[in-house]
């Protein structure tokens, strides 16, 4: 059977944008990423170990083709020296290990960050596709098409409503938890063909290239978390990360992620300088309406017109949730909705809740203090407590 990953473009755009930044600024950083399944699978993921190892072997045999490099290099924010680096890049198999621990599948990538950071999305896509190959594919895709048509009907109904001040804009963020590579392509192509007034792009660089869509993405948690271990004063790590992003992209890729240490702590660092330079903010945990009101209030306090900014939502969205947020906020600011699992793995089966997160950099622990209970990530409770103290972040009930 063909490998799950056949192109190194088959990943999220923000892996490239973070990769370029770290290559230019901190290429010597050492990092460790760990795979975790947060829910109970139908069968033990450890059973997939032989196939996972075979897929990792195949992934590490891939390199960038000239047509792929030409596409990446054609994005105006990608620098020529980064393309030159990608031309000689290959994943190193000794930097990633998969093993079984009882019923659990453990995958750890460890080495220079610029050599291991791009494993994440590929690993998640591999595990997902291998897992769902054991189910009835024809039945799942038949159910998925019925659900897909219902989603498209919802968007057609939206087109018949009286317009709000700002348009509804939807993006595909579904690489990491997709049912399969072919299913993601079918779903994205359907939205592109049948809802072009609402569907504005995909995070999947390969699909963006092949289908003529806009590739969408800026930064993820790992980018800001890395700065917790780069020698800057811990209280200043967010400002240092945002400043380096501004200097790297100089007006491009202007959506900042807000929940590495919580929205309140983020806004205390997001002063007039950053608020003017960044185009908007991305929500990924906590109550989305509470978060949006905090963001809009912050802009107003800084005397920035919220209608000139954008709020992007990406936390476990469905079409229903996105439409509800749009109706609540569409007259107040520009909006964007990045939907993942609900687009690319809504086929009548229970999706895996899997992640592969940065756990340490330069031998030091890093953490995410989520605004959602249960989503806080850190392997070192001492560092986690210190980070909470530095940013005055309370413990959420399910994180205690």
Image: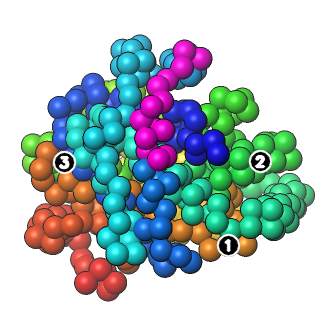
Hey, which quadrant is residue 91 in on the image?
A: top left
Marked residue nearer the N-terminal end (3 or 2): 2
Q: Is residue 55 magenta?
A: yes
Instruction: Indicate the secondary structure of the residue bearing disc 3.
Output: strand
Q: Which residue in the structure is indicated by mark 1?
A: 349
Instruction: Indicate the secondary structure of the residue bearing disc 1.
Output: loop
The residue under the point 16% across, 57% down is 365
Identity of the residue furthest to the right in this view: 160
Front in this rendered view, residue 156 or 270: 156
Relative side of 184 to 393, left or right: right
Report the Cα–Cα distance between label 3 and label 2. 38 Å
Front in this rendered view, residue 245 or 2: 2
Q: Which residue in the structure is indicated by mark 3?
A: 361
Range covered by the magenta-colored residues = 54-67
Quarter placement of the C terminus: bottom left
Residue 309, horizontal then vertical, whole percent: 52, 45
Q: Which residue in the structure is indicated by mark 2?
A: 186
Q: From the viewer's perspective, is residue 259 above or below residue 183?
A: below
Report the Cα–Cα distance between label 1 and label 2. 18 Å
Tell me if mark 3 has few (under 14), some (14-19) or many (20+) residues whose alpha carbon lies within 10 angstroms of its own: many
Instruction: Indicate the secondary structure of the residue bearing disc 2.
Output: helix
Q: From the viewer's perspective, is residue 72 above or below residue 327?
A: above
Relative side of 322 to 54, left or right: right
Hey, which quadrant is residue 200 in on the image?
A: top right
The residue under the point 24% across, 46% down is 110
Residue 44, horizontal then vertical, whole percent: 48, 74
């Amino acid at each position: 059977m063909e490998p799950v990953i056949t192109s190194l473009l088959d990943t999220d755009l923000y892996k490239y944008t973070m990769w370029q930044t770290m290559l230019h600024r901190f290429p010597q950083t050492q990092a460790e990423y760990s795979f975790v399944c947060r829910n109970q699978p139908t069968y033990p993921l450890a059973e997939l170990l032989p196939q996972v190892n075979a897929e990792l072997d195949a992934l590490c045999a891939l390199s960038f083709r000239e047509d792929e490099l030409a596409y990446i290099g054609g994005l105006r924010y990608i620098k020529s020296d980064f393309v030159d680096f990608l031309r000689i890049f290959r994943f190193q198999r000794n930097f990633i290990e998969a093993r079984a621990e009882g019923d659990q599948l453990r995958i750890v990538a460890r080495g220079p960050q610029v050599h291991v950071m791009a494993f994440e999305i590929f690993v998640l896509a591999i595990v997902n596709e291998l897992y769902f190959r054991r189910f009835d594919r024809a039945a799942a895709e038949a159910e998925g098409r019925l659900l897909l048509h219902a989603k498209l009907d919802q968007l057609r109904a939206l087109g018949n409503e009286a317009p709000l001040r700002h348009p509804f804009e939807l993006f595909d963020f579904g690489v990491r938890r997709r049912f399969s590579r072919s299913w993601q392509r079918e779903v994205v192509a359907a939205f592109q063909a049948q809802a072009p007034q609402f569907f504005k792009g995909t995070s999947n660089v390969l699909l963006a290239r092949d289908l003529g869509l806009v590739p969408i993405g800026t930064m993820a948690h790992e980018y800001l978390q890395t700065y917790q271990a780069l020698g800057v004063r811990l209280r200043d790590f967010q400002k240092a990360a945002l400043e380096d992003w501004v200097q790297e992209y100089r007006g491009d890729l202007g959506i900042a992620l807000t929940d590495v240490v919580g929205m309140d702590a983020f806004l205390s660092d997001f002063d007039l300088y950053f608020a003017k330079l960044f185009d908007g903010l991305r929500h990924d945990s906590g109550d989305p309406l509470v978060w949006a009101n905090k963001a809009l209030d912050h802009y107003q306090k800084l005397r920035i017109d919220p209608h000139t900014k954008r709020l992007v939502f990406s936390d476990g969205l469905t079409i229903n949730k996105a439409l509800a947020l749009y109706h609540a906020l569409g007259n107040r600011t520009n909006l964007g909705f990045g939907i993942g699992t609900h687009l690319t793995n809504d086929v009548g089966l229970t999706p895996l809740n899997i992640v592969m997160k940065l756990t340490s950099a330069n031998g030091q622990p890093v953490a995410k203090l989520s605004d959602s209970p249960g989503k806080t990530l850190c392997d070192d409770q001492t560092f986690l407590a210190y980070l909470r103290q530095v940013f005055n972040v309370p413990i959420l009930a399910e994180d205690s």
